[in-house]
């Protein structure tokens, strides 16, 4: 269980950081068109035939993969190095990512 306790904060920091970047720069792993139940790799634009796209699932997939990579990296590094660093980053990075997303979407929130 000690490994999970070391990997979970790294997963949270990696996932939050990449989700903010994927959202702002629109980097989905895949695009879903719910009107026609169609999945496409990467970014896809809306059209009259398939309707509006949903990129959120693709952002979450990339963020989860990045979080898993950060968690695996934290298990490879010595515990003395990562113990305090990940404890701080697990709180700071998601809060900073949320602040960045609010700033990036300020027109949505503040007209």
Image (cartoon, rainbow, N blue to C red):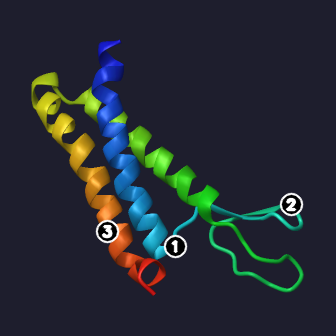
Q: Which residue is mark 3?
A: 100
Q: Nearer the viewer, residue 89 or 98?
A: 98
Q: CA distance from mark 2 to mark 3?
A: 32 Å
The extreme front residue here reads 110
Q: Position of residue 53 (x, y in %)?
A: 72, 72
- Residue neighbourhood size for the residue with mark 2, other residues' Cα within 10 Å, grouped as few (<14), some (14–19), many (≥20): few
Q: CA distance from mark 3 to mark 1?
A: 15 Å
Asked which secondary structure carries label 1, the reply is loop
Q: Position of residue 9 (x, y in %)?
A: 30, 35
Quarter of the N terminus within the rendering: top left
Are discs 3 and 1 less than 8 Å apart at CB? no
Q: Nearer the viewer, residue 20 or 30?
A: 20
| Residue at 26% from the left image edge and 41% from the top image edge | 90
Q: Position of residue 86 (x, y in %)?
A: 21, 37
Answer with mark 2 or mark 3, whichever residue precedes in sequence.
Answer: 2
Q: Which residue is mark 1?
A: 26
- Residue neighbourhood size for the residue with mark 3, other residues' Cα within 10 Å, grouped as few (<14), some (14–19), many (≥20): some
Q: Picture quarter containing residue 80?
A: top left
Q: Which residue is mark 2?
A: 37
Q: Picture quarter containing residue 52?
A: bottom right
């Amino acid at each position: 269980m000690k490994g999970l306790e070391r990997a979970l904060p790294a997963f949270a920091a990696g996932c939050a950081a990449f989700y903010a970047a994927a959202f702002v720069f629109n980097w989905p792993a895949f695009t879903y068109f719910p009107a026609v139940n169609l999945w496409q790799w990467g970014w896809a634009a809306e059209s009259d035939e398939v309707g509006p796209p949903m990129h959120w699932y693709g952002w979450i997939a990339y963020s989860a993969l990045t979080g898993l990579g950060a968690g695996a990296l934290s298990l490879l590094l010595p515990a003395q190095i990562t113990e305090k660093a990940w404890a701080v980053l697990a709180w700071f990075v998601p809060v900073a990512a949320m602040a960045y997303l609010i700033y990036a979407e300020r027109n949505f929130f503040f007209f």
